[in-house]
Amino acid sequence: MRMSKMAGRRLREVPKDAKTVSHQFLVRGGYIRPVSAGIYSLLPAGKRIVDKIETIIREEMDRIDGQEVLMPVVLPAALWQESGRYDSVGAELLRFSDRNDKPMLLAMTHEECVTALVRTEINSYKQLPVMLYQIQTKYRDEARPRAGLIRTREFTMKDAYSFHTSQEDLEAYYRRAHEAYERIFRRIGLNNVLSIESNSGMMGGKVSHEFMAITDCGEDTIFVSPDRTYRANREIAVADWKFEKVPPEPLEKVATPGCKTIEEVAGFLHVGAENTGKAVFYQDARTGELIFALIRGDFEVNESKLSNVLKVAELKFADDAAILAAGAVPGYASPLNLRGKKARIVIDRSAMESGNLVVGANEPGYHYLNFNADRDLAGVDYVTADIATVREGDPAPGSGEGLEMLRGIEVGNIFQLGTKYSEAMNCNYLDQNGKSRPMIMGCYGIGVGRAMASVIEYSHDDYGPIWPMSIAPYQLEICAVDPQKAGVGEAAEKLAAELESRGVEVLYDDRGEKAGSMFSDADLLGIPLRLVISPKTLADGEVEFRTRACRDSRRLKVESAAEELAGRVREELAKFAL
């Protein structure tokens, strides 16, 4: 490929809206161009990288017995109504009506569609297990798209779905899929990916893992033990907290004028935040039901954990009117003296297993000393659960060592869905005895564009991306300095042809730009190997060679350069082989 003919300009200035390294270099290097917020076109350099990532994904999916299909992006709302997700998913699901006023949607994921497909094609245990996958466009109407391809509205995703006759079979296949994902990320050059336990969220199921590319710009928070034996997303992370249950003292009401916050109360009473109980009120976003979470004052409520405990799809903070209607007083609230059953009460372990806490008296200007939940809430309906947010330094499960907090980009996820969709949508098979049973499902996703962006976050310098050989837009770039002089252009053409005949993907910069500008463009393209041909080197019968990852260079003889470099490309590709 000649650089003079390749579509896509390199830009010198950093785009004003590009805050992450990958966003900056993808735009500056001529890989993507914005169309609208969170929607991008891929230019040739970006498309070549995406195609190579998709090829690796296909190879690994085929290796675990996957069969590729292609499902539509536009789906009838009826499919999502069958599963129950049409009303439970929020505004990120783009809904519309076609010209016949039939409710439709743009698919953000394809569980419903693939379940409907499988129920028409498979009806016997003899046909199971089966895994179908696709690489397809998705649309998620993000409120705040950010960071280029890391969080977009329209994106390309590989999504796979497996169907089984037993939980044991699903678990066995789940392990195969996990191993395939580890190979995929290694092969595309993402060596900073951790598999962590995660929250299943809207997908459903009890077991799920996310594959996180560790980087400072990541929007997910991860907690890991120093030895990496414990790894979990903040949404579900736990710690090996130990709480001391001291002998209970008599409940005592005290005046705390003007003290509403934990800090104010603790300061006024000369106690630590760990000696207080914090009341946090939410409402079920769909039903409006009031939810009262009580947690020790030095902890914060983890809303994902709370949602999972109560099986509530979406929480919102409660308004004062709802709090007052339950007999609680904002700023002075506790589970004591609530009227009737106007709130679902959840008490965190930290508050349940600690004693003699300071809590609100549900009366303006007053708190109680020496609150002990097990003693003082006799006859009150409540649930005890871990709803606390883990903090950096909290003791790791098992080892007790301080947890480390990392940031990551979610580049893939896998879920054991169970029968959530198959039961709702009557996706059944006949077992050995002719009895109808729901299929047991798993699903497995990888964001293709996000993976490309994550490689840049992991592998770059101040000048541009450093692409691994397995997914680089080209494998070698020839930079011709003064191509009109001293036979430089002719030598470059000949070398390009020799390399291509040996199977090397070559980008030849034939534009005759000044050396500094040409090398800046080469850095932005991040091609692993570079040959510089100039009148000076050619006079000695040599060319200059360097790798993108290293600024050092060495000379090669013109007559042997093509064979030596083709061998180098083969060696590098072997590191990423199947």
Image (cartoon, helix red, strand yellow):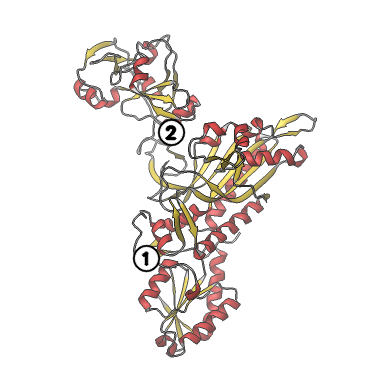
Say if 343 sits above or below 16 in the image: above
Measured in 3D between alpha carbons, the distance from the residue under mark 1 to the one under mark 2, in whole angstroms, is 40 Å
Quadrant of the rendered structure where residue 103 is?
A: top right
| Relative horizontal placement of residue 124, taking residue 212 as reference (left or right) | right
Q: Earlier in the sequence, mark 1 or mark 2?
A: 2
Say if 85 sits above or below 454 in the image: above
Amino acid type at image mark 2: Val
- The residue positioned farthest toward the front in the image shown: 99
Q: Position of residue 362 (x, y in %)?
A: 30, 14
Q: Looking at this view, is 195 or 153 the one in front?
A: 153
| Relative horizontal placement of residue 219, taking residue 366 as reference (left or right) | right
**Disc 2 element:** loop
Q: Position of residue 367 (x, y in %)?
A: 26, 15
Amino acid type at image mark 1: Tyr
| C-beta proximity under 8 Å, tags 1 and 2 | no
| Relative horizontal placement of residue 136, taking residue 293 as reference (left or right) | right
Q: Residue at x 66, y 39 (%)?
A: 115
Q: Which residue position is annotated with label 2?
A: 238
Task: Look at discs 1 and 2 and give the one toward the viewer.
Answer: 1
Q: Position of residue 483 (x, y in %)?
A: 44, 84
Say if 290 sits above or below 40 in the image: above
Q: Looking at this view, is 244 or 47 the one in front?
A: 47
Q: Which residue position is annotated with label 1?
A: 463
- In which quadrant is the C terminus drawn? bottom right
Q: Kindly tell me whether residue 551 is visible in this rendering.
A: no
**Disc 1 element:** loop
Q: Residue at x 50, y 74 (%)?
A: 5
